[in-house]
Image (cartoon, rainbow, N blue to C red):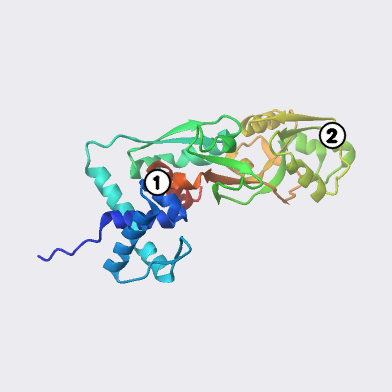
Amino acid sequence: MVTRRLPPLRALEAFARTVRLGSARAAADELGLSPSALSRRIGNLETFVGRKLFTRARQSMQLTDEGQAFYEAVNPHLEALARAVESQSDNLSLLRLHLGVLPLFGSQRLFPRLAELRRSQPLLHIDIDTGPHIEGRVGDTLDAGIILSRGPASGLHAVRLDYNKVHAIASKDLAQTLGDKPDAELLAKQTFLIHNELPESFRAWKAELGLHDLEPAAIDQYDSGQLMLEAAAQGLGIAIMHDDHLKRARDGRLTDLYGAEVESPYSYWFVCKPTALEERPVRIFHDWLVRAEL
């Protein structure tokens, strides 16, 4: 039986980290190497495979087309190797991810699918944080977060998870009182329920229905989408929320007003620091989340 010669694993690690981080200097820092030592490792790999993986100019390294093809071919096998070693080791501790999640996303979209993640990644355990200001705590008290935002701050790795429509959601009894067509006089007597971090949704809804000057009797602020849905179901007001929230709630007490579909200024995003993708808990969750299409 002929054993194939393996490439130097440290060189493969240096190559993969440089690609993922997009910076040779960042990769060298992560590995505790000098830039020249990192370059030598990648040079050894290029010699082994007989391909130019990077172009080098003025201390910068740019991935070549052959380098990109090599990365796409090899990286899945590196991940598979890491998983295989983990599955056969009695010495590895649990993989721990500190994740910030909005409660409504967690209950409607994340938790119904977490069992499949546990089956495929039994060592991964997730500490859930539903506290406020998730984006600002990513990289500090949180490894990663799922936020509802007009667009994450620069400097974060971000993946957009959906596109949404804004709907006005009310109890069926209230909807019957308001009728099938918008009546500015009737709507002005209502209470609207607005998430305190998503004020532009109400403005977008009013603009789409031609109700720019609408001033309701009251606007009640909420910091929980779950409580907004329950308040609307109890007839306490009209909740301005995403259509996806109504569909997933499957609450027979609720309906949307007028059937108007308004482009939402906000989307759900997965966010983390770019360097956090090198940490296995973050990388595993990130890759699963993208594939799962929650």
Residue 193: image quadrant is: top right
Q: Is residue 44 above or below residue 96?
A: below
183 relative to 59 in the view: left or right: right
> Does residue 111 sit above or below 60 in this rendering?
above
Residue at point 55% right, 34% down? Answer: 137
On the rendered structure, is 134 left or right of 2?
right
Q: Which mark is residue 193?
A: none
Q: Who's the residue at 50% across and 35% down the image?
A: 142
- Viewer-side residue, 8 vs 253: 8
Dividing the picture into quadrants, the one containing residue 49 is bottom left
* Distance between mark 2 and mark 1 Cα atoms: 54 Å
Q: Residues within 10 Å of mark 2 (few under 14, many from 20)?
A: some
Image quadrant for the N terminus?
A: bottom left
Label 2 element class: loop
Q: Give the residue number, with chain letter if any, for mark 2.
A: 216
Which amino acid lies under the numbered mark 2 shown in the image of this protein? Pro
| Residue 85, image x, y percentages | 25, 46
Give the total of numbered labels.
Answer: 2
Q: Which mark is residue 30?
A: 1
Q: In the rendering, at what x and y percent does residue 109 appear?
A: 52, 41
Name the amino acid, label 1.
Glu
Callout 1: SS: helix
Relative placement, left or right, of 194 versus 8 is: right
Pointer 1 local density, CA inside 10 Å: few below 14, some 14–19, many at least 20: some
Query: Where in the figure is residue 22, as x and y percent of width and height?
Result: 47, 56
Name the spot of residue 236 as percent of width and height, x first: 74, 28
Please state which of residues 193 and 139 is positioned toward the viewer in this rendering: 139
Tag nearer the camera, 2 or 1: 1
